[in-house]
Image (cartoon, grey):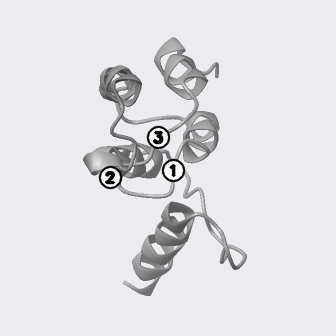
Amino acid sequence: MAVRDEVVAFCRLGGLPSEQDDSEDGDEAFEELERRLHAIAAPVTDEEAQLLVGCFGGDNCFGLAWTLLHLVESAPSPLVTSEPVEGSNEWRVLLWRRYRNAQAD
């Protein structure tokens, strides 16, 4: 299955910026990212989830990281099924914890 244009367009923007960027350019980039992210309908494919997980930044990005997390989790297969190495992105670690917790149920 091909990756949808909406996912490609979002990923080409380079990932979620930091909440610390309060520049006008940062505001415009955030608005574009938000628009592109909300254009992606769930569920995503496993291939799309692989691309999207690389778009997490280092913080919450004003809530957009949670939207991205839920999109990644909408894929048919869990993306992170083994414990990430130390120093991994906090969102990858969170995906691992949520996967592990789901297995405990």
Between 86 and 71, the residue placed more toward the observer is: 86
Residue reaching furthest bottom? 104
Q: Residue at x 48, y 45 (%)?
A: 75
Q: CA distance from mark 2 to mark 1?
A: 11 Å
Query: In the image, residue 13 lies at what x, y percent?
Result: 54, 24
Q: Amino acid at mark 2?
A: Trp
> SS at mark 3?
loop
Residue indicated by mark 3: 16
Q: Amino acid at mark 1?
A: Gly
Pair 3/2: label in front: 3
Residue indicated by mark 2: 66
Q: Is residue 13 above or below residue 74?
A: above
Pair 2/1: label in front: 1
The C terminus lies in quadrant: bottom left
**Disc 2 or 1, which lies upstream in sequence?**
1
- Mark 3, Cα crowd under 10 Å, few <14 / some 14-19 / many 20+, is many
Q: CA distance from mark 3 to mark 1?
A: 5 Å
**Dot 3 and dot 1 residues touching (CB under 8 Å):** yes
Residue indicated by mark 1: 57
Q: Residue at x 46, y 40 (%)?
A: 16
Q: How many marks?
A: 3
Q: Is residue 96 above or below residue 91?
A: below
Apparent side of residue 65 relative to residue 89 in the rendered image (left or right): left
**Disc 3 or 1, which lies upstream in sequence?**
3
